Image: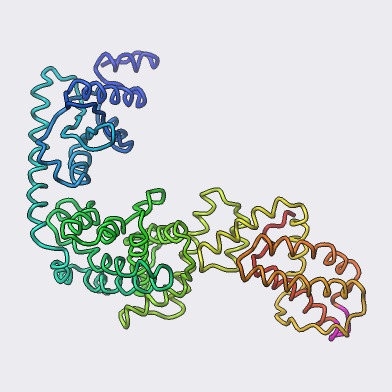
Amino acid sequence: IEVSTGSSYEKLLEKGSVIPDFETRKQMVLGEIKKAVASTDFDQEAEVFIDDGLLTTVTNLVEIPFGVCGRFDDKFLELPDEVLVTSMRQHQKYFPVIDQKGALLPGFVAVNNTQVTNPELTREGHERVLRARLEDAYFFFESDKKIQLADRIEQLSGIIFQAKLGSIKEKTERIVKLTRLLCEGLNPDATDAACRAALLCKADLISDMVGEFPSLQGLMGGAYAAHDHENEAVSVAIKEHYMPLRADSPLPSSPEGTLVGMADRIDTIAGCFGIGQEPTGTADPFGLRRLSLAVIHLIEKSGYVLSLKDIFQKALALYGERVNGSSDTVDMIMEFIKRRFINDCVRRGMDSRAVDAVTSVIFSDVNDCLERIEALSELRQDATFDVLAGSFKRIRNIVKDNRETAVDPTLFSEAAEEDLWSLFSEIKVVVEDRLENNDYRGSLRSMLALKDPVDRFFDDVMVMTDDERVRDNRLNILTSIGNLILAVGDISKMHTD
């Protein structure tokens, strides 16, 4: 094809059966898919399940699309849906056919990279290729079902999790212990089912099906657990414990799946940091960034009150002498997860200054931090808040490293310091009570009343006086006020200069 002018480029390519524009080609692919399924009789209304990722892939693979709809034997519908979809979508780039309720039908649509002159012959070719894959999957499925998941656990000792951290069987044992610890503190009613799921959650790694389709790990475990007549909560938890797969992927629907998923990821993160295998700027072989974000989202979604620092200390202890379980390792893990938390909060549109104000002071309980961030973001709209934030910034600059909070009222010589201390003493009781109940909004609103007395204190009182006892007393007043405000967050970081 010879192109004489730029403006004729697309038209000339189209005459040569090449559609250069992606969006045009994408719409043609969609049109071909719909036309193909409409021309095939499934004895009921049928449509195609459109996966956006597959649609993009197929659009990029074809120059001019032509769709054909094929069928497969009904017996293959006995396979778990995920097996069928993976066989069609991942390996063959086929689109599954579904009914009006979303259930799979024995059909698929293949999009060819050329205009087909004999659609029937092309359809038969696609059916033959898919049939061979599905026959293999069917054989694996039937073969795997002959051995119960519980009978596969011992074989996990032959799969290495990480050379220094032992086998998958050893990892499974740690996951069970971590799951039990999590259940005891977060959801005792889920203990039995969650611990059973934890015991079985990696057993499908031994199966032929997962050996052929690694992306089905967990999903097949859930299917085999159901076949073995395990409790439904157990099979669902096994199926869901790898969720979420990515940052914005669906989360587990069950508490058991959530707890096992948390335990699995916490064990991996602790182990890798414990042997010095933390991520670098260029390498993250165990996907610890993704795992950390998943832990954060699982905790947030469940509303659990959990000290990450405590659970990672316990997770490291379960490794014994295999890892460095020192407080330095725990601190490294906490700093790593905190960075993921901060980035995620900002990515989701939270007030970056509020996020910084909270995480610079405290980070261990994800949901507690989120409540603080929300309270600070809301109160920031109040004009009084920015003035108080500015005053607090001034307090921080004056008190510097002072940690003393003992105040002697007999040393007061100015009305402003008497008034401030009197009001602060009243507010402190109210705020501490509200903090006990995690009422951060109420605590902050109470502290807003300190704005005017603090301003008068700075206007009327010389803090750095020559009298050392009086100077220290005044510094202690400011330190006490600063500590109370810091109990929510470092609001100086939210001050607008």
Q: Position of residue 216 (x, y in %)?
A: 22, 52
Viewport quadrant of the C terminus: bottom right
Which quadrant of the view contains residue 129?
top left
* Residue 444 to residue 413: above or below: above
Residue 196 sits above or below residue 468 on the image:
above
Location of the N terminus by quadrant is top left
The residue drawn where x is 32% and y is 62% is: 286
Residue 422, position in %: x, y?
83, 74
Image quarter of residue 148? bottom left
Q: Is residue 468 magenta?
A: yes
Q: Position of residue 195 (x, y in %)?
A: 29, 69
Q: Which residue is more in the foreground, 480 or 335?
A: 480
Residue 143 among magenta residues: no
Question: In this rendering, is residue 51 above or below 28?
Answer: below
Is 3 in front, or is 73? 73
In the picture provided, is 477 more to the left or to the right than 52? right
**Which residue is more in the foreground, 189 or 31?**
189
Q: Horizontally, is 3 left or right of 247 in the view?
A: left
**Magenta residue span:** 465-470
Q: Where residue 356 sits in the image (x, y, percent)?
A: 60, 60
**Residue at position x 57%, y 68% from top?**
362
